[in-house]
Image (tube, rainbow, N blue to C red):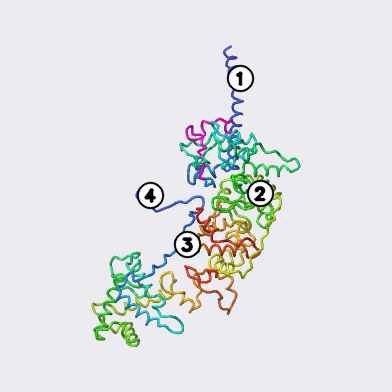
Amino acid sequence: MRHSLALLVTTAMCAVLSPWSASAADQADQISRGQYQAILGDCAACHTKPGGQPLAGGAPLETPFGPLVPPNITPDLETGIGSWTAEEFKTMMRTGIGHGGKRLYPAMPYPAYTKMSDRDVSDLWQYLTTVQPVKNEVEANQLPFPFNIRFSLFGWNLLNFTEGTYQADPSRSDEWNRGAYLVTGAGHCSTCHTPKSIMGADQEGQFLKGSSLQGWYAPDITGGNHTGIGSWTSDDIVTYLKTGVGTKTIASGPMAEAIENSTSRMEDADLAAIATYLKSLPDDSKATSTALPANDPRMIAGQAIYRDNCSACHSADGKGAMPLFPALSGNQIVQQGSPETPAHLVLFGSQGAQTDARPTNPSMPSLAWRLSDKQVADVLTYVRNSWGNAAPAVTESDIKKTMESR
Amino acid sequence: MLVGTTGSAFGRTFSGGLPWKAASADPPVPISPGGWRFFTEGEGRLVSAIVDRLIPADDLSVSGNDAGCAVYIDRQLAGDYGSSSRLYTKGPFLKGIPQQGYQGQPNPSELYRRGLAAITRYVAEKYDGKAFGDLSPDQQDSFLTELEADRIELPDGVGGKEFFGFVLNNTMEGFFADPVYGGNKDMVSWKMLGFPGARYDYRDHVSKHNEPYPHPPVSILGAMDWASK
């Protein structure tokens, strides 16, 4: 009797234990899947301050409407999201309405995250609950009146926001659909690469055609040859996103950070899917530019400035020396409608993305101490209109604007 | 323990990317324009007259003074060079061999102050109270030649040959150094020599034998052709 009771108890315990072990393994899987979602969504880009505690709140984002500070999303009860429920998190990701009905500013890319699947959002939530809680009070809303009134977002959402998870296009391949899901959803590429309306929403029909942000210009990444990535092969795109180094260019600025924190850590299959999707974006850019004549005074001065300041690395013929020195000839980043990125590089210098594949990230020195605004404008005009490049001339006031952006 | 502490005080470890900071640069500071920073008016006149004899104006170039050599020396003496602030300056003071350079105790600013005073006194005593600048070019040249040859004994125990060496060296530095330091006005010496200036890449020209280098010189501060007309 005693013996059979013991057996019974053991059996009962097993019956209880087995499902529990299975669910622990499931939970571990879910957490690591969620960690991958955090990489895809690049949460750290905004929610971790440079040199700060992971996800405990970021550096202020300078929006056209004023500064917004990305909040603490560690599971700290008082200052983080420790008091949120899974359901509240999902609602926030879907609709931009957070804990206690508080409306988020679309600097939080919920217009993209709304496309994420239930499973991916729930995995991400599980992961976030396991992050080290950090006590760090963040005053997110530092906008001036009237933008500091969160209710105004109700109207913004009505006009600019469509809720809903990604709907696969059955006429396309699984890989294309995966790429579209990543680019338009978690990857939120359009947050930087799509030009914004006066309300700060993505402009209709301008998807990924390039946009200004924080003194940089996120380039056109649609299919055009001139400013877009039409001349890039899928492999070029994958290599660039994995290593930070393309065939002609090295990532800089916010994209270098996105590559370091996010794309370089994505699975190869996902990068290939992203490339497949981006390569399918049409080349409908009508904008063509004619190069300025070489005898334009700005071109003549620009050439002298280029020879004395740039040619040692980027070479007189603009071919550079990859993978160390970017080629400028045929490089799309110097031919965008806006010269902000090359202006930023010349004025402040830049350090390339640092990835496992390219650990010795080269850097470009700042030349602002040596060149006047006019000289920076002229040398960029020269670079944008030489060796087959063509783009509008750069003015002194363009340079002043970039100088003040920092 | 002490070794460990010292090690950590001086050692720095970097992980991840190389350290880098946006908008950082450590360029040389251009000299400030205007009057003398170290010399008195009299000293300034004397040095201007000397550098004009060391590099007289001719069909090759403007004179040493017109090229800014006296201003160059003045700013150097007013700065780290004059006070030897970046050198070890404690004893023992041994003579040293010529290749070791100057080994004496007085720093360059002290040497100039005493040397210029000694020359002023010597010239006044020898030429009826005249200043060096009032002598004829031939008289000036003959004085400097004698000074260099160590055949003049300056008052106050000043080593004339050694001091002449300082002035000649510093004049050449001013004449050939980058204009950012006050001399070599408009890159005059570089144009004279065909020296291309602050450049470091000649890949496009190494294979062009017996062809003159086509580009004008460039200073740390830039070049004339950087301005669009």
Question: Which numbered tag is attached to residue B4?
Answer: 4
Where disc 1 sits, the SS reads: helix
- Badges 3 and 4: C-beta atoms under 8 Å apart? no
Mark 1 Cα-neighbour bin, 10 Å: few <14, some 14–19, many ≥20: few
Amino acid type assigned to the residue bearing label 3 in the image: Trp
In the image, taking residue B122 as reference, residue B97 lies left or right, namely right
- Badges 3 and 2: C-beta atoms under 8 Å apart? no
User: Earlier along the polypeptide chain: callout 1 or callout 3?
Assistant: 1
- Badges 1 and 3: C-beta atoms under 8 Å apart? no
Q: Which residue is mark 1?
A: A11
Q: Quadrant of the C terminus of chain B?
A: bottom right
Q: Residue at x 39, y 67 (%)?
A: B32
User: Earlier along the polypeptide chain: callout 3 or callout 2?
Assistant: 2
C-alpha distance separating marks 1 and 4: 59 Å
In the image, taking residue A26 as reference, residue A141 lies left or right, namely left
The magenta span reads: A66-89
C-alpha distance separating marks 1 and 3: 79 Å
Q: Which residue is mark 2?
A: A206
C-alpha distance separating marks 3 and 4: 41 Å
C-alpha distance separating marks 4 and 2: 60 Å
Amino acid type assigned to the residue bearing label 2 in the image: Gln
Q: What chain letter is assigned to the residue under label 4?
A: B
- Please check the rendered image and state whether residue A323 is part of the magenta-colored stretch, yes or no: no
Q: Residue at x 60, y 69 (%)?
A: A296
Amino acid type assigned to the residue bearing label 1 in the image: Thr
